[in-house]
Image (cartoon, grey):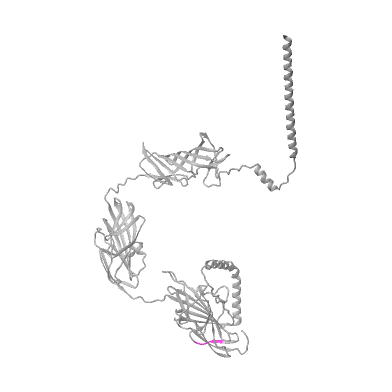
Amino acid sequence: MKKPVLAFDSALRRNALRSSLLILLSSLLAASLSLAQEKGAASTHAAGWVVLPINEYRVLRAKAYPTEPVPEPPPLDATLTRVEYDLHVLGDLATGSAKLTVDVLKDGWVRVPIPAGLLVRDAQLDGKALSLVSGDKGKAGTHVAALLSHEGRSVLTLNVDVPVTSATGEETLSLPSTDSGVTRAAVQLARQGIELRVGGGLLAEKSEAAGDTKWLAYGRGNEALNFTWRKKSEDHHVELPLRLRGSLTQLTSLGEDSSAISAEVGLEVVQGAARQVRIQLPEKITVNQVGGAMVADWEMNNGELVVTFLEPVEHSARFVISAEARLPRDGVIDIPMLRLLGTERDSGGVAVEILGAGEIKDQKAHGLEDADATDLGTMIANRQSPALVAFRARAGEAGATRSLSINVARYDQQAVLMANIEEARYDVLISADGKELVQARYAVRNNQRNFVKITLPTGATVWSASLAGKPVRPGQSPDGSLLLPLEKSRGGEDAPAFPVEIFYLVKATAWQDKGHERVTLPALDLPISRTGMLLYYPPAFKLNAEPGSFHTQEYQSPSSAVLLPAVEGGRDGGVFAVSATRPEERDRLEEFAKRERIDDKEKKDHTLSLLDDYKAKSTGGKVTGILPVNVAFPAFGPSMFLVSELTSENQFPAAEFSFQRDKKGGVR
């Protein structure tokens, strides 16, 4: 039985071995087939070179390997989020702590400035000691700073001292301004009965307990937080009845149409406190203004002027009243008088002055005594009116009757000159063919006139005109005369002289061998105090002045400063000549003037250039249109100087000459 079993077992083993071999061969065949396929596929995609432009390569590379954007750094390294003070005032110092909440926004070391004005005794960061370093020198007011090394929020605790300043009974504690969002200050003072003012913030709490006063305030951050306190004063004066003394000094200026009233009021509080004062107003008086340091408001009501003060007056106060009244022009005038009401005793006085042509013929006073103007204070003493009377209030009770009436006589005012030509200068050049070129210059003083009327000789042609050195276009009146504008002085000031200039040409008959010549000058509608004429005539002739309003004399410079000759001769009449000057004398004078001009030229070049720049800038935007040119006067030939005085308005000044051709025929 054993043999068949063993034979069956061996057969099974042979069959299993045969099956394993078949499976192994199948696996090897499949692997070889797949490897062949992969090799065939790889052979179809062989490696090689691809040529791309650099720009396309960079674009493809950026798409294949995108770069992550770098985050922007914060605008600030650190911010001061909150500042909290806890201070106790002890004498001249306030000591305590200051907590600074800081948010650091970047990694690394960050400098955090400590608010200026704090005296730091100790510093801690999150409970650990911290050393402070010198602050940034570029930021004003920062003396120390803290260095923080880690990002995030930190609390910096400082033990600080803040000085307390005292002035005029008040004490002030000033906490510096910071850039924090929240500034909170708790201050404790070991006193009670304190009046407090807070500047740069808002007072949130105020309490008094156990002999201490506590304040809690919030600041604006960008402003200093100031605590100002003083001892609360008990106002016993208000509880007492008011006792008042006053002084009222009144000045009445009587004019032609209306009269002005000015009054100085002084109050002295003997008892209590005055919140307002009442003043009795006569009829026909209108108050225009009440001014004073203590005046808050004023009003007129039922014939009284009520003046209210900013705060109750305990000692003294002064204010000024300005008013006006409609009073008669002349005759007997009753002077309206202001009176203080509610006073125990009042003093002062009253003064009356006449404005214009008038005088005080008589006066009647009741309850008043004659006084000098200097006894009533500076307001009366400074008046310059020749017709002024002053009275002092007679001592007595406040309700004493006082009155004043005066008799005024008025006179018609005489017309006087409002404009005048203090000096006229003419430079005249005569040619042998009869042409006359005239440069007329006038030194004018004016208070009222707008124009000066200039009537030129018949047939004259205007070349140019100027006012105070600036070219102007003259107007023309209906009768053909020229109208030149004038400058005006300010009210109450002396009129300064200014120059007015005009150039014109006149054609006359030609000169023969001998004859007579009449030079007629312009007529003005203003009187002329003095006149000077410098006449240049042809060198081939002899010239003699005939008797008349002009007479010859040696040349003199203009007495008016505005007509003085300029540095360079010609245009402004800078000619140094005398009557009937000999050639050698004239040459010496011209040589002297030439040397002076050369010496002054270098000194004045820079000044003249600056003046030209200034004039160009100041007048560049004001002048419109084309202005006439300034013509230079051609000083040529021998000359003769003549003068005249007191030329009336609308008069043509004229000078007559006799001429004869020089027989020698020479040229001088």
In this rendering, is residue 82 above or below 9? Answer: below
Where does the magenta region start and end?
543-547
Hey, which residue is sitting farthest top in the picture?
A: 1
Name the residue located 53 percent from the left edge and 36 percent from the top edge: 130
Q: Is residue 398 left or right of residue 590?
A: left
Taking the image as drawn, is residue 90 in sight? no
Residue 515 percent across, percent down from the top left? 55, 90
Residue 265 percent across, percent down from the top left? 32, 59
Based on the displayed image, in which of its 4 quarters is residue 382 positioned? bottom left
Locate the C terminus and report the quarter of the image it occupies: bottom right
Name the residue located 61 percent from the left edge and 72 percent from the top edge: 598
Q: Is residue 545 magenta?
A: yes
In this rendering, is residue 154 above or below 51? Answer: above
Q: Is residue 584 left or right of residue 532?
A: right
Q: Which SS type dominates the magenta stretch?
A: strand
568 or 482, nearer to the observer: 482
Taking the image as drawn, is residue 484 in sight? yes
506 or 230, nearer to the observer: 506
Residue 413 percent across, percent down from the top left? 35, 75
Locate the N terminus and report the quarter of the image it occupies: top right
In this rendering, is residue 325 above or below 306? Answer: below
Residue 245 percent across, percent down from the top left? 29, 55
197 or 417, nearer to the observer: 197
Q: Is residue 125 left or right of residue 411?
A: right
Q: Is residue 113 magenta?
A: no
- State how many labels appear: 0
552 or 352, nearer to the observer: 352
Q: Is residue 251 left or right of residue 82?
A: left
